[in-house]
Image: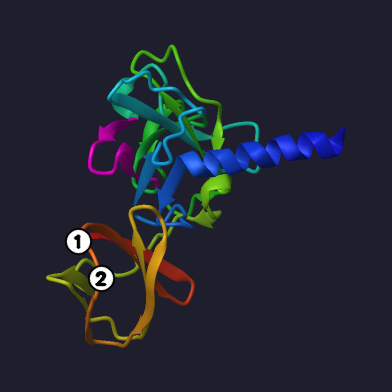
Amino acid sequence: MKNFLYLITLYFIQVSWSQIIITPNPFSINSGTITITYGSAGNYSLFDPISDPNLYIYTGLETDGVTATWDYHDVWTNITTLTPLTWNSAANAYVATLNIGTRNYFSEATSSITSLPSATTANNWFFIIRNLDGTRQSVDLFGANFGFVPGILQTDSFLSSNEVIISNGKIQSEYLESLQVEIFGIDGKQIEKFNLEAQTTKNLNLLTKGIYFAKITNKNQFKTIKFIY
C-alpha cells in the first residue's frame, strides 16, 4: 500500500512539473523576479482555466518550522494582493512574474499587511492557482517541488544595479571579484554557463532573440537578472 501511494505522489509531482515551470530554477527568497509559466506542455489538469485569460496566484511562506501553517500570505478576499497569471500568446501559456522577497504579505503574527522583516527564514514557499472570484482553485502547490530552496532574506543587497549590466547582447561586470554566470531561457532550461572575470565585458552569443534570465553567483550569494536579447 505504501508503494502504491508513493507512486501516486511521484506521478502527481512529475505531472505538476510538466505543467508549471518556474524560472530561474533553483530559486529562493533572494532570487529577485521569478517567472511562473503554466500550461506550456498543453496540460491543465492541475487547474482548468476554462478559456479564462485572467487567472491569479495566491502565495504564502512558511517561516517558523510548522509546515501546516503559512506565516506570511496573500489575502484570499483581496484581489489586489494576488499576482495576475495571464495568457501570453508568445509563450502559448499563462505567465506571471513576482518577487518573493520584496512583496507585502499578511502576517499571521501581527494580523496586518507588511513587508518581510530582514533576516526572515523561508523554509518553503507555497502557491495556489485560482480564478477571479475564488470559486475554483488548484490544490496547494509546494515550492520545494518546483525548485524552491530554503533561505534567509538577505539584509544586504548583492550586486547593485550598476555592478552587472546586460544590454546590447553583452554582459558587463564592474564587480571586484570573479562571478559565475548561468543563462536560462524562459522555459527554465540552462543555455550557457561561464565565469565572468572582475571588471570585464563578454558577448552573449545566444541563438535566438527573446526573454532570458541570468543567475549571477559569487560564493554563497546570487542574484537573478531578467533581460531581453
Q: Residue 188 location, x and y as percent? A: 41, 56
- Circle 2 Cα neighbour tier, 10 Å, few/some/many (<14 / 14–19 / ≥20): few
Q: Residue 142 location, x and y as percent? A: 56, 39
Query: Which quadrant would the C terminus be assigned to in this image?
Result: bottom left
Amino acid marked by disc 2: Leu
The relative height of residue 69 versus residue 123 in the rendered view (above or below) is above
Q: SS at mark 2?
A: loop
User: Going by the picture, which residue comes out furthest to the left?
Assistant: 168
Please tell me the numbered disc located at residue 63: none
Please tell me the numbered disc located at residue 206: 2
Q: Left or right: where does residue 98 sit relative to residue 116?
A: left
Query: Which quadrant would the N terminus be assigned to in this image?
Result: top right
Taking depth in this image into account, of 139 and 44 the one nearest to the observer is: 44
- Circle 1 Cα neighbour tier, 10 Å, few/some/many (<14 / 14–19 / ≥20): few
Residue that mark 1 sits on: 209
Q: CA distance from mark 1 to mark 2?
A: 8 Å
> Is residue 138 visible to the viewer in this orientation of the structure?
yes
Q: Residue 47 location, x and y as percent? A: 47, 25
Magenta segment boundaries in residue numbering: 83-100
Contact flag, marks 1 and 2 (Cβ < 8 Å): yes
The relative height of residue 202 versus residue 185 in the rendered view (above or below) is below
Tell whether position 85 is magenta. yes
Q: Left or right: where does residue 3 sit relative to residue 160?
A: right
Residue name at image x 50 percent, y 43 percent: 18
Q: SS at mark 1?
A: loop
Residue name at image x 65 percent, y 32 percent: 68
Report the coloring of the rendering. Answer: rainbow
> Is residue 125 visible to the viewer in this orientation of the structure?
no
* Quarter-of-image position of residue 104: top left
